[in-house]
Image: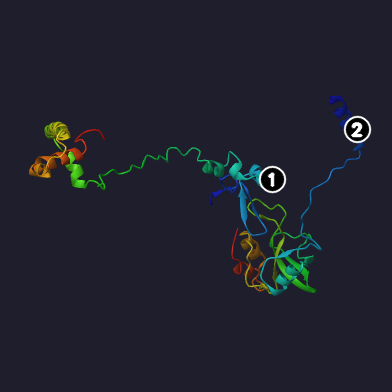
Amino acid sequence: MRIGLCTYSGYKIYPGHGKTVVRVDGKTFTFLNSKCEAAYHLKRNPRKVTWTVLYRRKYKKGQEEEQTKKHTRRTQKFQRAIVGASLSDIMAKRNMKPEVRKAQREQAIRAAKEQKKTAKAAKKPVKVAPAKKKTAPKTKAAKVTKKATPRVGGKR
Amino acid sequence: MNFTSTIWKLGSHLRNVASFHTTPVCKNIQLLTRLRVVDNSEIGKRAMAEGKPPKVIHVYNKRGLGGIGDKVMVAIKGQKKKGILVGLKKVQKPLVPKYDSNNVVLIDDTGTPLGTRIHAPIPTILRTILKSKTHVKGADYTKVLSIATKFV
């Protein structure tokens, strides 16, 4: 004998129990007992009737053991090259040793001080020959570039 | 408020002194019962479409009340046809399903159905009932089951 299911409550119907009804459109309904049958005829939606299997399935009652969503999505972080600096530049700056950084900082400070001095000196003799400036291109160029770069290892 | 409502209730009770007890509807298949043809025979389809369902004019039963699997004579579109009852509105025995309409399948005298297919579900209990009605040299009523599509 087959153990059917009640179409209303979802309970098992053992042989010798229950009633089947066939609607005019051909749909068959099996009810476990007169309670289910009466509820069906009263047009009570089993999905709203608390004790039925359909309700429990809809509102996921008593299924905590099966469902454990422990998969949290994590975004991947990776270094990207920016317009101003390529990836290798960024990595070089990042991986610079602290001694190197300190040396660079000191150099930058010295360069800044020298530039200030030259600026003060330049104010007095305004019309200095441009050849003078050209004769010392290296130091000046070095100074300029050093000033242009932002502080190494400084604030982000 | 309470006082007036009780007076009202007493008054209505006094008015319904001649109340009577009624029995529920019988839902039997008997003379002049209208049936629903569930096969796809031409006569059946036309009759049901017109809104003139077949009426029982004789039940081949000692009791005159048709049960499931009983042969009946129906008047359909001015003709006399025989049919087999395949679904009843009346509450049945434990393992027999109940239908929302009284269904009939039209047959001829030899038991061969007039239609080619039955789309309504047929109770499986008919297998035993029709077999018991079938005699070796008489009409074979089980042919009706061969055109059924769904069993309940």
Which is more toward the observer, B131 or A56? Answer: A56
Q: Which mark is residue A42?
A: 1
Q: Position of residue A90 (x, y in %)?
A: 20, 43
Q: Quadrant of the N terminus of chain B?
A: top right
* Disc 1 packing (10 Å; few <14; some 14–19; many ≥20): few
The quadrant where residue B31 appears = bottom right
Q: Position of residue A59 (x, y in %)?
A: 53, 41
Same subunit: marks 1 and 2: no
Colour style of the rendered protein structure: rainbow
Chain letter for the residue marked with disc 2 in the picture: B
Amino acid beneath label 1: Leu
The quadrant where residue B12 appears = top right
Q: Which residue is mark 2?
A: B11
The vertical placement of B116 against A138, above or below, is below
Amino acid beneath label 2: Gly
Q: Quadrant of the C terminus of chain B?
A: bottom right
Which residue is painted at 12% across and 44% down in the image? A130
Q: How many numbered marks, from 0 up?
A: 2
